[in-house]
Image: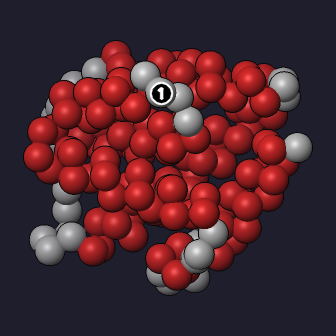
Amino acid sequence: MRIKAIAFLLTSIAFSAMCEKAIAHDQNPIAGEVRKAASESLQVYQKSGISGLISAVSDCWKLPRDFCLYLDAASHRLALGAMHSGAQLSEYFYDESVSKRGHAWLVSNGHGRVANEQYLQAVDQIMVRALVVQREKLPDGKP
């Protein structure tokens, strides 16, 4: 039931994200967590780079919760983006590593691997938009 509610809310967020700055105005608690994860990951990346993201995500997963899933997704996206600047992708942020951590958290919901994979894909898609919105809020417009 929880996964269905979260999936529904994430789908709602995705549709509203098509409008400019829609996520920024959404009062949904999950949207707030997604925005917070995007903002925190950008701040950590600016301050400490990829190693800071690895530490932040690793520390978060010590007390697993939905926020860690969002932080992991945001950090993964930033690490992938850093590759375009010539940085090598850390094994910590390989797709299969991020997916494995996400599945480990989602397995407790009782849904199968396919449902969990769909949920992780939805989180990733929403995180891309959330990161764009958060980057626009930065003074120089980049991490």
Amino acid beneath label 1: Leu
Q: Is residue 95 visible?
A: no
Side (left or right) of 61 relative to 123: left
Picture quadrant of residue 85: top left
Is disc 1 placed on a helix, strand or loop?
Answer: loop
Query: What percent of the width, then of the height, locates residue 108?
Result: 74, 24
Check the image and name the residue furthest to the front. 63
In the image, residue 78 sits, relative to residue 42, either above or below, namely above
Q: Quadrant of the N terminus?
A: top right
Q: Is residue 115 visible?
A: yes
Instruction: Identify which residue is drawn at 34% across, 16% down.
Output: 91
Instruction: Identify which residue is drawn at 65% across, 76% down.
Output: 16
Q: Nearer the viewer, residue 89 or 41?
A: 41
Side (left or right) of 20 relative to 27: left
- The residue wearing badge 1 is 63
Side (left or right) of 99 relative to 136: right
